Amino acid sequence: MSATYRILDEPRPGALGHLVVNPVFPLLSLMMAGAWLGVPWFVFNSFAMGSTTRRKETVLAVLVVPGTLLLFMVLGTLLKMEVLTKSSMPYALVGVIVWKLAVGYALYNLQQRSFALHEYYGGVVRNGALVLVASIFLGSQILMALTGGTPLLMVLLG
């Protein structure tokens, strides 16, 4: 009879465990390229490293889209009610950016604990700088191709 010892918060890397990156790279890609790259990268990284909080991370990542839509609809309603003017709308849209960055920072904080354990116990860690730099230079072109220039989709994925 053998007993197994298991740490509850120990990450369990999956088959893609060799593709794990430091969570700072998805956070920076969210800031520099947009949600189209940063949010899916957070989810992928979470499953690749076997993060113990991957369900929370996935739910939080999925909430980016409805939260952005809700903020966009509220701002549109405020514009129709003439609480906001067309000249104040760009300033109000900063709230949408803040929402996405706040979710990204929350994802980073959730993932950082599992990543630290993954790294400490000898897990493979890749450098995400190449993807980040490529997204900085090609991100707007990729976003335009993904959305076809539709303003609502640009706000959602940007």
Image (tube, rainbow, N blue to C red):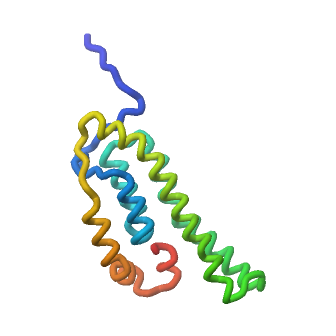
Q: Quadrant of residue 137?
A: bottom left
Q: Would residue 95 appear left or right of 111 to someone viewing this image? A: right
Residue located at (38% from left, 61% from top)? 40
Nearest the eye: 13 or 103: 103
Residue 21 placement (x, y as % from top left): 30, 52
Against 127, residue 51 (above or below) is above
Residue located at (61% from left, 75% from top)? 72
Q: Would residue 125 appear left or right of 52 to someone viewing this image? A: left
Against 134, residue 58 (above or below) is above
Residue 148 placement (x, y as % from top left): 40, 86
Residue 130 placement (x, y as % from top left): 25, 65
Residue 106 placement (x, y as % from top left): 51, 52
Q: Would residue 125 appear left or right of 89 to someone viewing this image? A: left
Against 73, residue 16 (above or below) is above
Residue located at (39% from left, 40% from top)? 114
Residue located at (62% from left, 70% from top)? 95
Name the residue at the top extreme.
Answer: 1
The N terminus sits in image quarter? top left
Total of numbered circles in the picture? 0
Nearest the eye: 17 or 104: 104
Q: Quadrant of residue 28?
A: bottom left
